[in-house]
Image (tube, coloured by chain):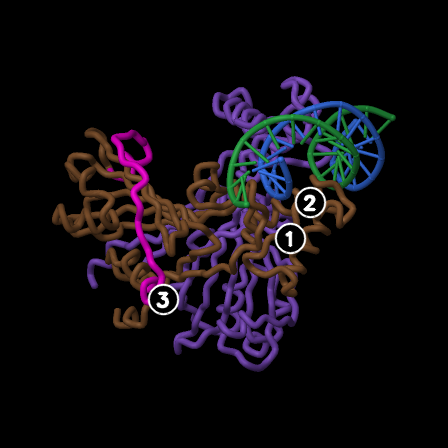
Chain colours: A brown, B purple, C blue, D green
Amino acid sequence: MPLYRQVQQLLENRIENGQLRPGDRLPAETELARELQVNRLTVRQAISELARAGQLLVRQGLGTFVAEPAAQFTVTLGPERTMAVMEQAVATLQEEGRTSEERLLSTEIAESDQAREHLGARRGRLRRVDTQLLVDQQAWAINTYWFGDARFRGIGKLLGAGDVFRICCDHYAVDLHYAWRSFAAAAASPRDAELLDIAVGSPVLLREGVNVNTEGKPVIYVSRRLRSDRMRFIVRYDTDTSRR
Amino acid sequence: MPLYRQVQQLLENRIENGQLRPGDRLPAETELARELQVNRLTVRQAISELARAGQLLVRQGLGTFVAEPAAQFTVTLGPERTMAVMEQAVATLQEEGRTSEERLLSTEIAESDQAREHLGARRGRLRRVDTQLLVDQQAWAINTYWFGDARFRGIGKLLGAGDVFRICCDHYAVDLHYAWRSFAAAAASPRDAELLDIAVGSPVLLREGVNVNTEGKPVIYVSRRLRSDRMRFIVRYDTDTSRR
DNA sequence: AAGTGGTCTAGACCACACC
DNA sequence: GTGTGGTCTAGACCACTTC
């Protein structure tokens, strides 16, 4: 077994048996290298794999820390076509005493073939809205919304005061339902990594979906990128399904 | 911008503009390093990030190759509680002219607190079955099934001749439905990486679920790890939902 | 200023696949 | 044997954070 993997296991063991606890700072890389009689790069390789897996948190200038245990949050999606998912999620979080906030990152007129296709919008300007979901001041997800600019004219001034779907529904009298949702996994890009506070290349859960109005016409296409160590989704078939 | 990221972008550009096509072999690392006037380690860092993202495929002793474009496969899950998902997937694949096979990796009596909890089985031996989903001879997913050994006595001799669920249903007269399915993302462990033919740390889509019989009693707990560059899931709300 | 991680180099040897 | 990627070392300098 390669040296760096031995170092990796050694660190994992120290975490597992409590020698290193969540929040603890590891010895400096040079320190570890000296202690273990290996090169600093070997230590770095071990650390970077553990950081990608979410077990360590590396902070330039500060040190390397044992990550907090994954406070996984489970969202239950019933078979209904309701829009309540994120609201349900937020409600559950607040019951647990957590604070949550959807922070506006940017909004602009932009182009995307993919968004046009999902929205069935061949012409007209598209608006892109980027937000960050913060739970207890920590990044949990980043979201990108696409919709026809004409449909939500003047939304730029309304954004920033609550979650995007609520603003759309409240101010524009739209009743939105899911048409579909998709789940995939991807490696964090440098931008993802920065906004989610994770290592580049870490796995992120990619969740896309299209929302339709009561006539079934696509209105919003949304793409979310979630920290995989903090969120997972459960699709549950509620008991009331048996009434079908 | 760091050098290795410049090299990374340079390679991405060559792939994008067609200078490097899927299946092509890249120049050797030492060659690239000489050509770009950088150290081999710098080239390696660029390559390893692209390999984790699924754009390159690295083969020791052979070379580094441009990965085939992601032949994404979409599974549509209706709101029904049927078991048809993998069968539907396999059917679609075969319509496309692909071959698919669920290959048995191992089966044994084993223990897992998690499995016991999901199955509600406090006592009795548990059987674990590991399989690999191959499409066109290539690994697409690895699966782990857990169930009470008594429920499917003698299944060891039946396995290896078709997919696990079909064997369970056909030979043991069980009618299975989904109770729930979960979606998450994770970093590929060394074992995942080997079985899925991807780089360690690559993102994998983790899909778990519990299947119940007609009385609603949990029978099988299954965990699948999917190559994220080859599969994504879509939860679609079929039109017939409107009949509810 | 001091200490941390981030990047880069030059060079060596090993493990694996193919001929 | 030859060429590929895989691992490891020693050493240097840079960027960031805190004091």
10 Å crowding of disc 1: few (<14), some (14-19), many (20+): few
Write the residue at 29% across / 58% down.
A85
Give the mark count: 3
Q: Is residue A156 above or below residue A76?
A: above
Write the residue at 41% across / 61% down.
A73
Q: In this view, does B111 lie above or below A170?
A: below
Task: Measuring from the top left, give residue A8's x and y in whole percent.
Answer: 67, 51
Please tell me in which quadrant of the rendered image residue A232 appears. bottom left
- Asked if labels 1 and 3 touch by Cβ distance under 8 angstroms, the answer is no
Q: Is residue B214 above or below residue A176?
A: below
User: Which residues make up the magenta segment?
Assistant: A92-119
Residue that mark 1 sits on? B191
10 Å crowding of disc 3: few (<14), some (14-19), many (20+): few
Task: Measuring from the top left, give residue A78's x and y in whole percent.
Answer: 31, 63
Q: Is A103 colored magenta in this rendering?
A: yes
Of the residues shown, which amino acid type is indicated by label 2? Val
The C terminus of chain A lies in which quarter of the figure?
bottom left
Can the viewer see residue B134?
Answer: no
- Asked if labels 1 and 2 touch by Cβ distance under 8 angstroms, the answer is no
Residue that mark 3 sits on? A96
Please tell me in which quadrant of the rendered image residue A220 appears. top left
Task: Measuring from the top left, give residue D7's x and y in whole percent.
Answer: 74, 41
Q: Tell me the chain of label 2.
A: A
Residue that mark 2 sits on? A43
The mark found on residue A59 in the picture is none
Separation of residues labelled 3 and 2 (CA atoms): 38 Å
Of the residues shown, which amino acid type is indicated by label 3? Glu
Of the residues shown, which amino acid type is indicated by label 1? Arg
